[in-house]
Image (cartoon, rainbow, N blue to C red):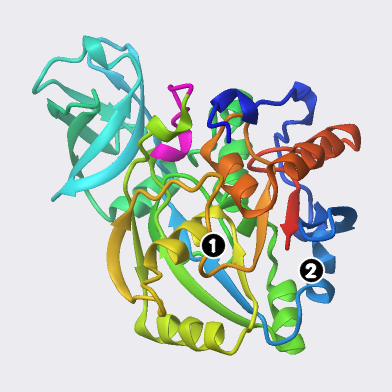
Amino acid sequence: MSFNKSDYNYILPPELIAQKPVEPRDHSQMMIISTRQKTIDHKHFFDLPSIIEKDSILVLNDTKVIPARLLGNRMTGAQLEVLLVQAVGNKQWECKVKNSTKLKINETFNLCDQKIKAQLISRNQQGHCILEFDYKGEFFEILNQHAFAPVPPYIHKARIEETDRNQDLKTYQTVYAQDYGAIAAPTAGLHFTESIIERLKQKGVEILTITLHVGIGTFEPIRVEDIRQHKMHFESYSISQRVAEKITKAKSQNRKIVAVGTTSVRTLESAWDGDRLKSGSTSTNIFIYPPYQFKVVDQLLTNFHLPESTLLMLISAFSDKELIKEVYETAVEKQYRFFSYGDCMFIS
């Protein structure tokens, strides 16, 4: 079996990269893929309740995206762009700062329309900056008013207007998001509306939530040709005892477990312990690529991913590498919309 990164490359016309989500959000296209029958069908996301079997368990990741992109200025007037990575202490955050080499240790500068004063405390081994923030009021409230959603670079280059900022804060968030912690959205969840969730419940689909805070690793490319050498970043996750017990019981009853997004897959597969799902809060750096034996997930809803990405490798492991190649060729041919604000697929 080949473990070459280049096996997961494909040609994507740039105009198929979605810059904005469809409105309403449940009107995106959805490709239906049967791994066993090797078939590809075409529906819309609002058809999901007719596709998922009654008595299935649908697992959502309820992480909430932080408005993690902060703009500001050094005292010299030079512009700065800061991406929050993770909180590391009281008012201290690990951050990626553009052109940070010019910053001096202990230098202070302003962010978020001067609502936040930042000081560079140190740099870590990854070259990220440890910043200490000083502000009045509630941190996330300030971010909501003055920072930007951390939409990926292929989207944010097109963003300049305040209307875009406000729009992204709404659209780059699932309708069921609960706890701030992610610096990228679990994008498969962006298609859900309250009415789709209600229709699923009425059908008899049980909806459960887990939390995995999507981290910086989601933006990191694989830099080695042999994918087995790639190391994933750790991301924190939590599963309640109630959810763990329900999924464990459902597995013993052969009920279908449907994961919404690769983050839900990675959480569930990380937490499986022989014959049960473990509850608790911990972190995972699981990297799933072919061949991998899935222990929990039976069906998967996911978006169309970047070439040579770890996410594309995960779905190739979940389905069939050659079939997924055909899926992506078909998606390009039929003008599906790609990446975070794009269309989705349902794989069984």
Q: Which is nearer the eye, 148 or 94?
A: 94
Q: Is residue 323 left or right of residue 81?
A: right
How crowded is the residue under tag 1: few (<14 C-alpha within 10 Å), some, or many (20+)? some
Looking at the image, residue 170 lies above or below residue 158:
below
Q: Position of residue 172 (x, y in %)?
A: 58, 48
Q: Residue at x 59, y 52 (%)?
A: 170
Quadrant of the image containing the N terminus: top right
Label 1 SS: loop
Residue 226 visible somewhere in the drawing: yes
The residue at which mark 1 appears reads as: 294
Q: Position of residue 219 (x, y in %)?
A: 47, 33
Q: Residue at x 18, y 46 (%)?
A: 88
**Picture quadrant where residue 257 is located:** bottom right
Label 2 SS: helix
Q: Nearer the viewer, mark 1 or mark 2?
A: 1
How crowded is the residue under tag 2: few (<14 C-alpha within 10 Å), some, or many (20+)? many
Numbered tag placed on residue 48 in the rendering = 2
Magenta segment range? 217-225
Q: Is residue 333 left or right of residue 315?
A: right
Q: Residue at x 76, y 57 (%)?
A: 35
Q: Is residue 174 left or right of residue 112?
A: right
